[in-house]
Image: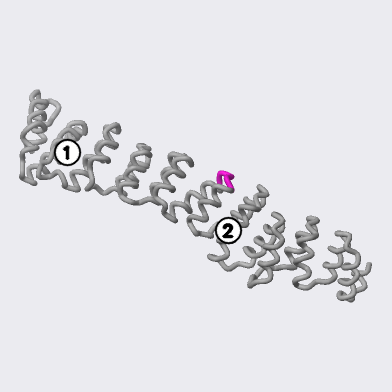
Amino acid sequence: DLWALVLTPDNQYRRNVIDQVVSTALPESTNADEVSATVKAFISADLPTELIELLEKIVLHNSDFSKNRNLQNLLVLTAIKADKARVMDYINRLDNYDGPEIAKIALGDPYGLYEEAFLIYKKCGQNAEAMDVLLENINSLERAQEFAARINDKTVWYKLGKAQLENGSVPESVDSYLKSEDATDYLEVIQAAEREENYEELVRYLTMARTKVKDSQIDGELVYAYAKTERLSDMEEFISGTNTANIQAVGDRLYDEKFYKAAKILYASIPNNGRLASCHVQLGEYTQAVEAAKKANNPKTWQ
């Protein structure tokens, strides 16, 4: 093979041949077979730096092959492996390469070109994948927040909300989840909000969640959150409408936590007169306690 002979390291004229091919001969060629044979020869000779020079001349300088997908792919991939500093420029300037596949390579070992992968995904309109890079590789919630605000895509907002929740930022995560209109993580949100005693945010989230998911736990937790935020009129209005909350269980929970006013409203709505009488007693409302006890008609209530 002539190319193999010319490009052997032992050939004293190799550099001159390469310079001539790169600077003049190939960039002016309109023959696809010539271009292909030359590129393959440079690859076989393991000349990545020279290959980059060659491909730049062909792809970046308005030759007949400037838009050739395979050559654009090869230029970016060769730079990823041999000259990382050039990759960002190529990503910006080229627009006909296999972005998602190249981004996966850029992300992987041993390259770790996270910013480059993020830019590729962004250029390709793969916003969910771009957000994953920001959250999992670049690890910047601040940039992820800016990206989500700019893109305003529900899937991106969901990913941001999940990451914020895992970071313990309950109010921020609720904002993101509301924009995503996705209630998939409602159990995790409930747990985190209650751990942080952030019931105002929980009310906002659960109000959205119950329009997406039918679950008695969501309704029950919303009743509980109304009580914890002392929004008793909202709680009363909610339980008077259609809901699937276990009112007895929520009432017992609130009673045990000494939220007697809220528990009283819940017991009255069932009604559970025995427990209602107990609430009245705890609140010093003895006349009402007697009335409720009479309705309960249970000796234990009088005790």
Side (left or right) of 232 relative to 158: right
In the rendered image, residue 49 lying in the magenta stretch gets the answer no
Quarter that holds the N terminus = top left
Q: How much space separates mark 1 and mark 2, taking CA atoms?
A: 50 Å
* Residue located at (29% from left, 48% from top): 99
> What type is the residue that disc 2 sits on?
Tyr
- Is 222 situated above or below 44? below
Image quadrant where residue 224 sits: bottom right
Q: Is there a contact, CB below 8 Å, between mark 1 and mark 2?
A: no
Residue 298 % position (x, y): 90, 74
Q: Tell me the chief SS of the magenta region.
A: loop
Residue 159 % position (x, y): 47, 51
Side (left or right) of 255 relative to 93: right
Residue 61 appears in the figure: yes
Residue 60's label in the rendered image is: 1
Residue 78 % position (x, y): 24, 38
Residue 186's label in the rendered image is: 2
